[in-house]
Image (cartoon, rainbow, N blue to C red):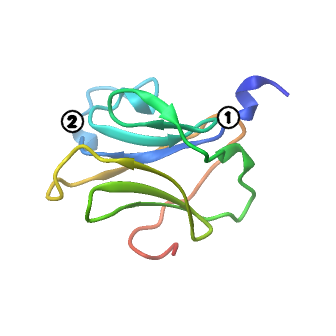
Amino acid sequence: AEESMAEGMIVGVTASSPSSLLAPPESSDEVPRSWLAGLDGAVWDGRQWGICPWQPSKLAVGDVVVVSVTEEQVMQIIVNREVVASVQVGVGAEAPLYPLLELAGATLGGKFYSGNAAM
C-alpha cells in the first residue's frame, strides 16, 4: 500500500474562530492555536509534532471518535470509549474552542456531533 494510505485522519481543536481564517489552510497544523492528533501516530502541541500511540488508519466503519477537552485543558482523543491520545491545550479554560477535522490517507469521511451525543 502507498505510504499516504497508511495515514488516517487528523482531529483536534483550535482557539481560532473559523471567521478569523483568511483562507483555507493547506493542513490543519497551519491553523493558529491548534492542537491535533492523528495521521500515523502523531500529536501536535501547537508548536511541534510528537508521537502518540493512536493509529487512526486502523479505524473501522462505525468506530466512534470523540475529541474532548478536560477542565485541566488536556485534549483527549477517545475511540469507542477508550482514551487513545492526549495533548495539553495551550489556552485558558475560558477560551472558546472549535473542532478541527482533516481527512487524510485512507479516511473517506466523518460526522460531527456536539455535546455528549457520541458518548
Q: Does residue 108 appear in the picture of this structure?
A: no
Q: Is 37 positioned to the left or the right of 29 in the image?
A: right
| Residue depicted at x 59% and y 42% | 9
Element under disc 1: loop
Residue that carries the numbered disc 2 in the rendered image: 20
User: What is the quadrant of residue 93 in the picture?
Assistant: bottom left
Q: Is residue 70 visible?
A: yes
Determine crowd level at label 2: few under 14, some 14-19, many 20+ residues with C-alpha closer than 10 A.
few
Earlier in the chain: of badge 1 and badge 2, it is 1
**Residue 76, horizontal then vertical, whole percent:** 44, 57
Observer-side mark, 1 or 2, equals 1
Judged left or right of residue 113, residue 40 is: right
Front residue of 30 and 110: 30
Residue 78 % position (x, y):
53, 62
Circle 2 SS class: helix
Q: Is residue 68 above or below residue 108?
A: below
- The residue type indicated by label 2 comes to Ser
Q: Quadrant of the N terminus?
A: top right
User: What amino acid is at disc 1?
Assistant: Glu
**Residue picked out by circle 1:** 7
